[in-house]
Image (cartoon, coloured by chain):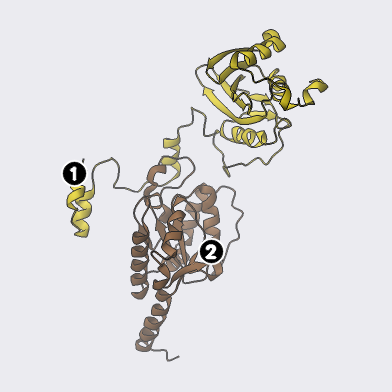
Chain colours: A yellow, B brown
């Protein structure tokens, strides 16, 4: 992270680049540390590691005008015992979206904290910490984000069974175990007639 | 006040009439159903002609409308608001989420049956109920009040252990004040 990263370019002098130009620039700059391809029009896919992700984001932000951090999301690859963090950034000039994918170990998921590059990345990181258990190094923020008093494993992991948990924790109301049509029963109990136009929607 | 049964009956009738004619609803929208409250209150349906109007704080309110799904996090706030309300107080469960969970029946963070946590006087079915249904639910509540059958606040005090047990089952870190009525 040299000082050149923190100097934003004068936006008026940049030529509008296409997807291949952007990909070539990034690949030239990082050599074999980063791989990638053009997925389709306006969509570039990059594969980085936890060591290089900060440099890639800083380079894209300050040299290639990808100033908008759209989202940080996570994919649970339970078969490969990995989480995939997807950093999505966008440039208002070239209107290209870059997806930067980083794999972390599922047993000990640790990724670098990037909220000094974009402040609002802090929110996404706190969400992933709560929903997937991914730890970000040096992340400052309240431990509880959406859930309160959560004692189970993080709920968005694929090995967490929500239906079973809901059955165990909350109370089911008896009488609607399946999706059968109950309008006839309701009609008998209440004495109300089913209107003519509604009868054709019967299952 | 004369303290025999017959005159108490007359007092009750007058009291219940006064209670059912001015229902102040706590302005606390919990779920997506709160979007049906503005059309109910404004000129098209004009719920104020039945004496239904909003109240700013729990202590001024008579009715707590649970409009839709309740996350366990907002259940905490609902319990707190409900316990601050003055007796007599009523709860209307609004939408299918409060009845059996609705479309969130298998969610990890929303409750399924509201009446296991706080006493519900009237349920309004639907997803979402239209303002006509809301007003019908209020009319039903008014009938129950007039008949003296809307006794959710009484049930809550008498079965406090049952409700507290269910509440503490999902709210592990219990930091709320314990009221003694």
When the figure is inspected, residue A78 is found, relative to residue A184, above or below; the finding is above
Can the viewer see residue A123 in this picture? Answer: yes
Please give the chain letter of the residue carrying mark 2.
B
Return the residue at label 1. A200
Dots 1 and 2 on the same chain: no
Percent from the top left, x then y, of residue B104?
Answer: 42, 43
Question: Is there CB contact under 8 Å for labels 1 and 2?
Answer: no
- The front one of A183 and A163 is A183
Percent from the top left, x then y, of residue B15?
Answer: 42, 81
Percent from the top left, x then y, of residue A81?
Answer: 55, 18
Q: Give the CA distance from mark 1 to mark 2.
A: 47 Å
Residue at image x 60%, y 31%? A70
SS at circle 1: loop
Q: Quadrant of residue A7?
A: top right
Residue at image x 45%, y 57%? B66
When the figure is inspected, residue B113 is found, relative to residue B60, above or below; the finding is above
Can the viewer see residue A62 in this picture? Answer: no
Give the farthest residue toward the right.
A3
């Amino acid at each position: 992270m040299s000082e050149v990263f923190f100097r934003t370019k004068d936006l008026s002098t940049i030529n509008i680049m296409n997807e291949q130009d952007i990909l070539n620039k990034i690949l030239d700059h990082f050599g074999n540390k980063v791989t990638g391809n053009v997925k389709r029009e306006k969509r570039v896919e990059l594969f980085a590691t936890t060591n290089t992700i900060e440099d890639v984001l800083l380079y894209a932000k300050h040299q290639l005008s990808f100033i908008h951090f759209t989202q940080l999301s996570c994919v649970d690859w339970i078969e490969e015992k990995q989480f995939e963090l997807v950093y999505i950034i966008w440039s208002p000039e070239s209107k290209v979206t870059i997806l930067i994918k980083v794999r972390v170990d599922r047993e000990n998921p640790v990724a670098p904290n990037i909220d000094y590059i974009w402040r609002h990345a802090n929110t996404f990181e706190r969400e992933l910490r709560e929903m997937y258990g991914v730890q970000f190094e040096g992340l400052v923020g309240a431990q509880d984000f959406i859930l309160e008093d959560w004692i189970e494993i993080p709920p968005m992991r694929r090995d967490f069974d929500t239906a079973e948990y809901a059955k165990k924790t909350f109370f089911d109301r008896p009488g609607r175990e399946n999706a059968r049509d109950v309008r006839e029963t309701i009609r008998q109990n209440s004495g109300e007639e089913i209107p003519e136009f509604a009868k054709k929607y019967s299952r | 006040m004369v303290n025999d049964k017959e005159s108490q009956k007359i007092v009750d009738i007058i009291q219940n009439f006064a209670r059912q004619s001015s229902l102040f609803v706590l302005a606390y929208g919990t779920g997506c159903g709160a979007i049906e409250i503005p059309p109910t209150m404004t000129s098209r349906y004009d719920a104020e002609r039945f004496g239904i109007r909003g109240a700013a704080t729990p202590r001024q309110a008579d009715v707590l409308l649970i409009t839709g799904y309740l996350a366990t996090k907002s259940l905490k706030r609902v319990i707190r608001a409900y316990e601050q309300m003055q007796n007599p107080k009523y709860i209307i469960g609004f939408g299918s989420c409060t009845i059996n969970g609705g479309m969130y029946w298998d969610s990890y963070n929303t409750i399924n049956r509201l009446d296991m946590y706080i006493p519900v006087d009237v349920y309004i079915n639907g997803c979402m109920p239209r303002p006509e249904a809301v007003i019908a639910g209020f009319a039903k509540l008014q009938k129950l009040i007039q008949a003296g059958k809307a006794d959710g606040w009484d049930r809550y005090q008498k079965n406090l252990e049952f409700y507290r047990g269910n509440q503490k089952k999902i709210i592990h870190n219990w930091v709320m004040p314990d009221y003694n009525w």
